[in-house]
Amino acid sequence: MYYTYTGSSGEQRASMIECRFTTNPKTGYPWLESIQIDRVPIAKDKIKEFNRLIPVVVAAKPDITDPGTLTDKDIIDLQVDWQYHDWEEHQ
């Protein structure tokens, strides 16, 4: 997957993430074998942590509908529901 990043001073950089998946024979769920970000491998312990979360995500049955292509106007109009949490005032 290719994506662009815009830094705090407005600079833009293109990056690439490459993920290799297989199927976990015990659960039948997808299983992440490796990740490279800009050709730099991610540590196996981080991948192991991610794989532990896959059953939780599958159990939550997320809506993975592809929203299609967004225009700049769509992105500006995009709104997110935000909830206040007590712990935020203690940070």
Image: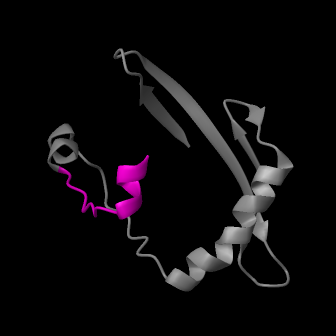
Asked if residue 74 lies left or right of residue 23, the reply is left
Q: What residue is shown at x 50% (from left), y 25% (from top)? A: 14
Asked if residue 11 lies left or right of residue 27, the reply is left
**Can residue 31 be seen in this snapshot?**
no
Q: What residue is shown at x 44% (from left), y 46% (from top)? A: 91
Q: Give the range drawn in magenta.
A: 78-91
Q: Position of residue 7 (x, y in %)?
A: 41, 22
Q: Nearer the viewer, residue 90 or 74?
A: 90
Q: Is residue 82 magenta?
A: yes
Check the image and tell me how it is coloured. Answer: one colour
Q: How many marks?
A: 0
Q: What residue is shown at x 85% (from left), y 80% (from top)? A: 25
Asked if residue 68 lies left or right of residue 50, the reply is left
Q: What residue is shown at x 26% (from left), y 48% (from top)? A: 70
Give above or below for 5 relative to 69.
above
Q: Position of residue 84 (x, y in %)?
A: 28, 61
Asked if residue 57 lies left or right of residue 62, the reply is right
Q: Is residue 81 magenta?
A: yes
Q: Which of 58 and 65 is in front in this view?
A: 58
- Secondary structure mostly seen in the magenta stretch: loop
Q: Position of residue 50 (x, y in %)?
A: 70, 60
Give above or below for 30 relative to 3.
below
Residue 29 lies in what quarter of the image? bottom right
Q: Where is residue 39 in the image (x, y as percent from the top left)?
A: 73, 31
**Can residue 42 be seen in this snapshot?**
yes
Which quarter of the rendered picture does the N terminus lie within? top right
Residue at the far front in the pictured view: 90
Q: Nearer the viewer, residue 46 or 61?
A: 46
Residue 85 lies in what quarter of the image? bottom left
